Image (cartoon, rainbow, N blue to C red):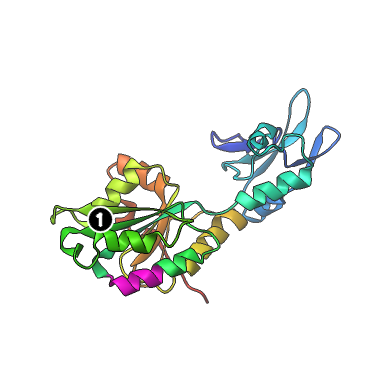
């Protein structure tokens, strides 16, 4: 007999659970089948009112109770409208942090143009500049450049202490903010959009997880903020563990 793990998702009250009378038969998002294909254990459970599935050892990203749709005025909407709203919002939430030390202003503008065309845009863009970068990347110059992208939030972080490395800056940003995913870029990266799309595919289409995805020289990486913060609380730095890196390979 299987034991229910402390980490699990009971489908009973999920809007997307498909029922025939009191018995769950499927998932309207097809997530049950995807989990099964990923060898995730699906348990059959029941209580005094329903027979339903439990996704064992996994939190389902699609779990939504009806009250979640209140914020969109869809509480009493048709199921198809709720599915469409979920799909509309079902994408990678991340912040992009760019270290300007290895950039020219032209390279930065090209990167920002690319970010602005992404299907899944960042929640925020953080530009990290050092005191020696202020001539090349003056605040007014950066502000004028960034204001062209009015659909992306941004912040310029100036580091006055030369001994404060980018790794220390990155650590501070990640541990003091609750960003879900972080993309760190330390030099112009041609594969930025591909890496973002690949990460989105893994998390939101394949319902899998990853540790760190990077390009060949690790100048562009994406990782989970929560995993980093948990490891950091235990005096570990996942970015220093070469075994956790997955190389983005378009082939």
Choose between 129 and 15: the one closer to the eye: 129
Which x, y percent locates residue 173? 31, 47
Q: Is residue 232 magenta?
A: no
Choose between 129 and 87: the one closer to the eye: 129
Which x, y percent locates residue 143? 33, 58
Residue for point 37% across, 70% down = 109
Q: Is residue 167 left or right of residue 87?
A: left
Choose between 213 and 37: the one closer to the eye: 213
Which x, y percent locates residue 181? 44, 51
Quadrant location of residue 205?
A: bottom right
Q: Is residue 46 visible?
A: yes
What residue is shown with label 1? 167
> Which quadrant of the rendered structure holds the N terminus?
top right
Q: How many marks?
A: 1
Q: Is residue 27 visible?
A: no
Which x, y percent locates residue 18? 78, 42
Q: Is residue 197 left or right of residue 15?
A: left
Outermost residue on the top side: it is 48
- Local packing at callout 1 (Cα closer than 10 Å; few below 14, some 14-19, many 20+) is few
Q: Is residue 104 magenta?
A: yes
Q: Is residue 18 above or below residue 37?
A: above
Residue for point 28% across, 46% down = 172
Mark 1: secondary structure: helix
Outermost residue on the bottom side: it is 251
Most frequent secondary structure within the magenta stretch: helix
Q: Is residue 14 above or below residue 106?
A: above
Q: Is residue 189 above or below residue 127?
A: below
Q: Is residue 193 left or right of residue 239?
A: right
Residue for point 27% across, 57% down = 128
Q: Is residue 220 above or below residue 35?
A: below
| Magenta residues (range) | 103-111
Residue for point 24% across, 66% down = 101
């Amino acid at each position: 007999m299987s034991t229910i793990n402390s980490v699990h998702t009971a489908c009973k009250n999920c809007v997307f659970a498909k029922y025939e009378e009191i018995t769950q038969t499927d998932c309207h998002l097809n997530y049950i089948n995807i989990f099964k294909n990923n060898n995730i254990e699906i348990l059959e459970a029941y209580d005094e009112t329903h027979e339903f599935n439990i996704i064992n050892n996994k939190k389902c990203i699609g779990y939504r109770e009806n009250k979640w749709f209140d914020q969109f005025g869809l509480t009493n909407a048709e199921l198809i409208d709720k599915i469409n709203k979920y799909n509309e919002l079902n994408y990678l939430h991340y912040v992009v942090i760019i270290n300007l030390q290895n950039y020219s202003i032209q390279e930065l503008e090209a990167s920002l143009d690319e970010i602005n065309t992404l299907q899944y845009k960042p929640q925020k863009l953080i530009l990290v500049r050092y005191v020696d970068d202020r001539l090349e990347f003056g605040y007014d110059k950066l502000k004028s450049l960034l204001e062209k992208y009015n659909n992306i939030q941004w912040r310029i972080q100036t580091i006055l202490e030369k001994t404060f490395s980018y790794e220390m800056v990155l650590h501070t940003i990640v541990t003091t903010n609750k960003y879900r995913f972080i993309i760190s870029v330390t030099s112009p990266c041609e594969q930025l959009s591909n890496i973002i799309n690949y990460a989105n595919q893994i998390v939101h289409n394949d319902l899998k997880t990853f540790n760190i995805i990077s390009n060949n020289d690790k100048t562009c990486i994406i990782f989970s903020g929560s995993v980093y913060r948990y490891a950091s609380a235990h005096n570990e730095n996942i970015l220093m563990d070469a075994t956790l890196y997955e190389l983005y390979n378009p082939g």
